[in-house]
Image (cartoon, rainbow, N blue to C red):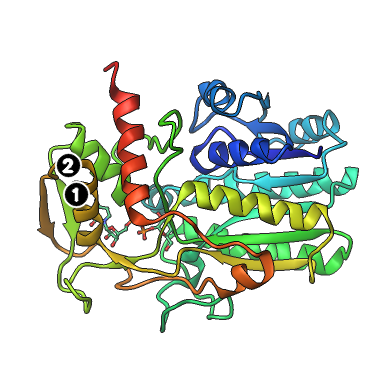
Amino acid sequence: MSKIIVTGGCGYIGSHTCIALLAQGHEVVVFDDLSNATKESIDRIEKIAGKRPELCIVDLKNKNATSAAFEAHKEALAVIHFAAYKAVKESVDHPLQYYENNFFSLINTLTAQQKLGINNFIFSSSATVYGMPETCPVTEKSPVSTPFSPYGNTKKIAEEILKDHTAANLDFSVISLRYFNPIGAHESGEIGELPNGIPNNLMPYITQTAAGIREKLMVFGNDYPTKDGTAIRDYIHVMDLAEAHVVAVNRLVDQKQEQNFEIYNLGTGTGYSVLEVITAFETQNNLSINYEITARRDGDVPVVFASTELASKKLGWTAKRDLNSMVKSAWNWEKNYRKND
Ligand code: UFG
């Protein structure tokens, strides 16, 4: 049994990954400052997995606190690093907070790992590093360009930091996972996405509209060069994403990596338009969503979907769950969460 440290493990993707790790027999320690999640996540993970991750409340921006937290878990074999701010709009309004939080926590984590010889690191990256891709599907060799937000820029620069760090430390290995659009929830409905305030992303906006918390979903643009005019994204079920992290961490723990810095896209390879997602949600959940077409949102790309070939070939991983399962699980979680409101 390997001990894995999951930073940001109380959050949306982190908590699903904890479940997938526990299901594979790993021991899990969560490092979280609870700035954008609550410790009830740990109870919910335990309820689903039947095993409780240890929670260490630590601010990874603080170098000494980070070092002490790692010292207490120095037998860990790997770190999966989710801890970061992730709201695109907020990052545009407060860039310094984003650069401070996302870089200090990354660098303090890597420094603490280096001191203790914890030599495996999985990084939570994003398709946002591709900016406006010229062609789709997007492969890992597609050019990285300037992301549209400080948030996106933290992902791009973090990958550069990791590239330099692995070049200088050949015994340190990193897998950077570039997520496309994670949605959905664990089938139990016990954990799921819970954005702070008004959601920026499509799926939580849809589920909150269905729940009556938001009056109307605004569909940003129907004049894109796509089949129905709305923008196309590669939505991936969060449990598929979580399982990909387990595969990636096992690859490093088992020393199966071919290079000490590897990058993989995590998507399904299939793009769906905004209207297709709404229709799937309505059909699968037997309800109707109040929506209105409005102007395009600044910075939105018309079409993005992943090439999944590399992850399939090298990791032996492909997404298993379809859009119907994503939209059903998303609504199941929202309903379950709101049932006592
Ligand atoms: N959309 C709407 N109405 C909404 C919200 C979104 O029409 O209320 C549309 C968007 O215009 C876009 C699609 O739904 O066409 C998906 O939008 P999301 O905000 O859910 O996702 P994005 O593709 O904009 O962003 C996601 C992640 C980012 C990441 C980016 C990388 O949220 O963190 O992918 O491509 F940086």
Compared with 41, 316 (above or below) is below
Q: Quadrant of ligand 1?
A: bottom left
Q: Quadrant of the C terminus?
A: top left
> In the drawing, does residue 220 fall left or right of residue 151?
left
Q: Amino acid at mark 1?
A: Thr
Q: Which corner quadrant of the image does residue 25 belong to?
A: top right
Residue 239 drawn at (x, y percent):
50, 46
Q: Nearer the viewer, residue 250 or 135?
A: 250
Q: Mark 2, residues whose alpha carbon is within 10 Å: few (<14), some, or many (≥20)?
A: few
Q: Residue furthest top?
A: 340
Q: Amino acid at mark 2?
A: Asn
Residue 137 drawn at (x, y percent):
44, 78
Q: Residue furthest bottom?
A: 135
Compared with 85, 48 (above or below) is above
Residue 300 drawn at (x, y percent):
31, 66
- What residue is rendered at 65% in x and 54% in y? 123
Q: Which residue is mark 2?
A: 286
Q: Mark 1, residues whose alpha carbon is within 10 Å: few (<14), some, or many (≥20)?
A: some
Residue 131 in view here:
yes
Q: Which residue is mark 1?
A: 283
- What residue is rendered at 70% in x and 62% in y? 161
